[in-house]
Amino acid sequence: MNSGRSQDQLKSTMSGYLMGFVGLVLVFGGIGILVDMTQQRVHDLTLATGPLIVVAGIIVLVGLYMLQPNQSAVLTLFGKYVGTDRSNGLRWANPLLRKTKLSLRAHNFVSDRIKVNDARGNPIEIAAAIVWRVRDSSQALFDVEDHEAFLRVQAETAIRHLASSYPYDEGIADIASGAVEPDSPKRTVELTLRSSMAQVTKSLMDELADRLEVAGIIVDDAKLTHLAYAPEIAGVMLRRQQAEAIIAARQKIVLGAVTMVEMALKGLSERHIIELDDERKASMVSNLLVVLCSESEAQPIINAGTLYN
């Protein structure tokens, strides 16, 4: 951690109930003396005592403040940081101290939909929900001008950087070209915004943690709430996804059909059910591939002659 950054120094304060009682006693005691003054039952020396006691009581009462659970008060004296109080309930501190309260509770921040280009240059819309809270009150108050405004700007910057670091969806160019089979272990799985949610979330949280550390803010969770292609290319990209899905499905069908034909020919040969020459094997392979790869149901045809007639 940079030594120039602020850091919370917990400060113990007095119970507000005790000091509140003392303040009330002083105020009412001073008022009682003033009442006695009106009845001329006190000496001249007491003439100034009553008002002074009332003022002292008011000063004591001014030092009272209330802290809710998960709330802190940053104490400063004429601009100098004195400490941070995190005690709950009614507290009392030097009336000259300025007490700036900060919430330590978890907050939700939902970003606006941002248009940005992904790793492939495609325009997309993206938004995220971030759960954050203040870890260090003095950093949030002294090291940045406005920690909530700082969070909004840094969150948008982190989301933009995340979107430009990953493609929206994986392509199948390597499969379509036949270089790699769909289920081949040699195929490299590409991290994408749509299919690699766990890795994307971790990357977003890590980047937010780095950016918000200077403000004493920690991120408990971050999730994408909106992810879509920009409207101007949404229709085109939908057709591309449909075409890629069809290609991938066809490749699986053809691969399965070839395997089944191979098994059929091998089984017929090993069991000596029928002897097939090359021409009959070619015809059988053709018929089986048509049946297995066709989108419609096969129509049986009875051949009353022979293959050579």
Image (tube, rainbow, N blue to C red):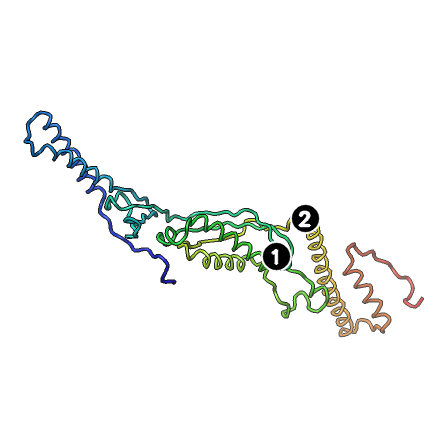
Residue 277 drawn at (x, y percent): 85, 74
Look at the image and tell me in which quarter the N terminus lies: bottom left
**Which quarter of the figure has residue 67?**
top left
Residue 118 drawn at (x, y percent): 61, 57
Give the residue furthest to the right.
Answer: 309
Whichever of callouts 2 and 1 sits on the residue coming sooner in the sequence is 1
Residue 167 drawn at (x, y percent): 61, 59
Q: Are marks 2 and 1 in contact (CB under 8 Å)?
A: no
As drawn, is 237 to the left or to the right of 2? right
Q: Nearer the viewer, residue 245 or 146?
A: 146
Label placed on residue 118: 1
As drawn, is 44 to the left or to the right of 132? left
Label placed on residue 232: 2
Label placed on residue 187: none
Residue found 85% across the figure and 67% down from its top? 283
Characterize the local packing of mark 1: few (<14), some (14-19) or many (20 or more) Cα atoms within 10 angstroms: many
Residue 265 drawn at (x, y percent): 77, 70
Give the residue furthest to the top.
Answer: 39
Specify the amino acid type for callout 2. Glu
Specify the amino acid type for callout 1. Asp
Q: Nearer the viewer, residue 87 or 304?
A: 87
**How many numbered markers are drawn?**
2
Alpha carbon separation for disc pair 2 and 1: 15 Å
Q: Secondary structure at mark 1?
A: loop
Characterize the local packing of mark 2: few (<14), some (14-19) or many (20 or more) Cα atoms within 10 angstroms: few
Residue found 23% across the figure and 43% down from its top? 16
As drawn, is 40 to the left or to the right of 79? left
Q: Secondary structure at mark 2?
A: helix
